[in-house]
Image (tube, rainbow, N blue to C red):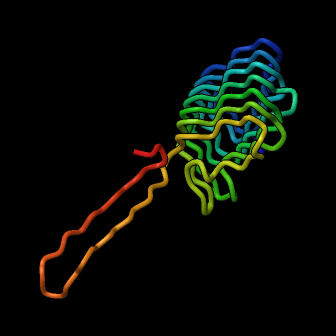
Amino acid sequence: GGCGLTAMVNSTVLDNTVAGAMTLNADCTAEGNIANTLTVSGANCIVKGNTINGAVTVAAAAKGTEMTGNTITGLVTVNSGENTITANDIRTSSEYAIDLKTGANNTVTDNTLYASEKVGDAAVKFTEGKDNLVQYNLPLSTELTVVVDDAIVGESSNINIKLVDAKGN
């Protein structure tokens, strides 16, 4: 509900509070806004430092969108390619935080991602083989292995613990 905002081609949308949906056409920049939902309809948009209190849709025509430093509380659905989604905080009750539906050559890195049961890289749905880069999204998954060799009850034992994060460190 509420009033929406549609930015025409080659517009800058700066520091607005939108009670409804915000829509960006081609070559737009949106920075410092608050909106209930966001639709990026045209190519080559920059979406930076916004708060979106619901879903974000990147349309099929919206190639080359850059999303950086946004706070989003809904599913981000991407229907195009060559987009960069980095350094965002995305939290949703959906199965995934980001769904790369049809596009190729998308980059999704260094975000904080929480979905209903998945976090980090696992919260991004994408098809293998389309050259989408999905890595270093937080929280990083870790693997903890504890090995106790020759343990005897009541005696001292050596315990080796190995912790490996998603980067292999």
Please provide percent x and percent y for residue 11: 75, 14
Please provide percent x and percent y for residue 32: 58, 26
At 39% from the left and 45% from the top, the residue drawn is 169
At 81% from the left and 44% from the top, the residue drawn is 101
70 lies left or right of 124 = left
Task: Tell which residue pokes out farthest to the top in this image.
Answer: 10
Quadrant housing the N terminus: top right
Residue toward you, 83 or 144: 144
Residue toward you, 108 or 73: 108
Quarter location, residue 65: top right
Is residue 123 visible from the viewing direction of this image? yes
At 59% from the left and 28% from the top, the residue drawn is 68
Task: Tell which residue pokes out farthest to the bottom in this image.
Answer: 153
Please provide percent x and percent y for residue 118: 60, 58
Quarter location, residue 106: top right
Task: Tell which residue pokes out farthest to the right in this image.
Answer: 61
Residue toward you, 41 or 79: 79
Is residue 3 visible from the viewing direction of this image? no
Task: Tell which residue pokes out farthest to the front in this image.
Answer: 150
At 63% from the left and 52% from the top, the residue drawn is 123
Please provide percent x and percent y for residue 37: 73, 40
Quarter location, residue 50: top right
In the displayed structure, 82 sits above or below 140; it is above
> How many numbered callouts?
0
103 lies left or right of 29 = right
